[in-house]
Amino acid sequence: MTGGRVTGGRVISVCVVDDQTLVRQGIRSLLELADDVVVVAEAGDGQTGVAAVERHRPDVVLLDLRMPGRDGIWALRTLRERGVDVPVLVLTTFDDDELVLQALRAGARGYLLKDVTLAQLIGAVRTLAAGGTLVAPAITDRLLRAVAAGDVPAAVDRDAPPVQELTEREREVLRLIATGYSNREIAEALFLAEGTVKNHVSAVLLKLGTRDRTRAVLRALHHGLLG
């Protein structure tokens, strides 16, 4: 089975890239407990991972970062350079702040540690397949502290237009985006229509000068808009 974007009740196809065979097999077994998820490919390093993604075009990629040979950061950058627009969820044991930033700047749309529960992992896969982003709250908290300490690199802002002022409602939406909420979850949390939330999200992206939610969160962190 090959990928294709998820709509309605379609099955979500996943590619797992991790250098540990037992970990890959475990993730496959766990994900396939969900009726709407199927693992279509596995790879043990970044280079074979990129090849697998190009061949199978999955809906979501689960990617480890530190692997022998070509690592996860290389894979992310290579996919972006080749124009392969597939949501990548970094799943790793390493909670290094600089790695988080490198992965997000390289195009990852989610970042979770391997100590997540099965429900959290499947929820993250569904979120990315639906077009959302997700960064573990603990990691977001540490990045906020890094911003306060001046440790977030200015490269986040390179070649970006000036940030425009957000309304209070847009800031509320942005904070929920940073927590990984989908549009529907934001609508439920703020008691708004989902269409209204989509409009707010579009406004946030426009005012932050970005085209996707992950980079919007990075710019927001850099400019202190999530504190």
Image: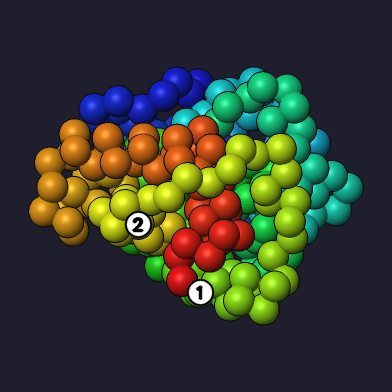
Position of residue 175 measured from the top left corner of the image (x, y, whole percent): 37, 60
Residue at 67 percent across and 78 percent down: it is 149
Label 2 crowding class (10 Å Cα cut-off): few <14, some 14-19, many 20+?
A: some
User: Can you see residue 162?
Assistant: yes
The Cα atoms of the two marked residues, 2 and 1, are separated by 17 Å
Q: Secondary structure at mark 1?
A: helix
Q: Secondary structure at mark 2?
A: helix
Q: Quadrant of residue 121?
A: bottom left
Label 1 crowding class (10 Å Cα cut-off): few <14, some 14-19, many 20+?
A: some
Position of residue 116 measured from the top left corner of the image (x, y, whole percent): 46, 68
Disc on res. 171: 2
Work out whether 122 lies above or below 46: below
Mark 1 is on which residue type? Asp
Question: What colour-coding does the image apply?
Answer: rainbow
Position of 115 compared to 165: left or right? Answer: right
Work out whether 23 lies above or below 16: below
**Residue nearest the observer in this picture, 46 or 203:** 203
